[in-house]
Image (cartoon, grey):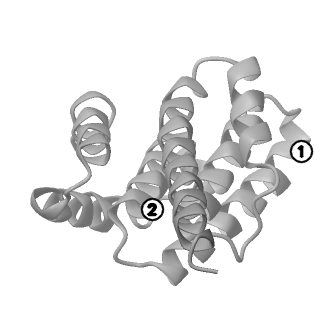
Amino acid sequence: MNRFIPIAIVLLCAVVLAKAQNLSSIRHQYRDATKSQEQAQEFYEQLQAVNKTDKPVLVAYKGSALTLLARYEKLAARGSKIKEAVQWIEQAVADEPNNAEIRLIRLSVQENLPKFLKYNQHIETDKQFVLGALPSIQDEELRAMIEGYIAEFSDNN
């Protein structure tokens, strides 16, 4: 029985590493998904199997993917897709309200949706939360993602 313990540890480490690489891939795809319909579709496909009981950061990314796909829908269909996306994002925030990555996702979605959709009520609080959390973030990739978003995309009003 003891000889199986090292195998189990290796398998567990492999699963953890694969999930970490998957999150890294999702982070990179999120930025690229804003560039074209094909990239938005690829981003969504990577998240399609995510459900609302999965890791909240993945739930938030799935919501963001739905907003990106909505850009390419006929105008009449956009509203329902955005409404669904908001539910995914808000579920993630409710599950982990102190997660800077989730709050960054919501910030980026709210700053980039048209104002008439009225999903913009958390912009300032999310921006302040993310900026306040930045010094304590140990994940260098996430830190760079936040700094890059704030510098390049965030509305400075």
Residue at 56 percent of width and 73 percent of height = 5
Which residue is under mark 2? 102
Sequence-first tag of 2 and 1: 1
Front one among 47 and 115: 47
Q: Position of residue 114 (x, y in %)?
A: 57, 42
Look at the picture and state if 73 lies above or below 140. Answer: above
Residue at 34 percent of width and 76 percent of height = 98
**Mark drawn on residue 33:** none
**Mark drawn on residue 77:** 1
Look at the picture and state if 93 lies above or below 148. Answer: below
**Does 156 sit left or right of 72 as displayed?**
left
Q: Secondary structure at mark 2?
A: helix
Residue at 67 percent of width and 17 percent of height = 36
**Does 51 sit left or right of 157 as displayed?**
right
**Does 27 sit left or right of 81 as displayed?**
left
| Amino acid type at image mark 1 | Ala
Mark 2 residue crowding within 10 angstroms, few (<14) / some (14–19) / many (20+):
many
Residue at 81 percent of width and 44 percent of height = 78
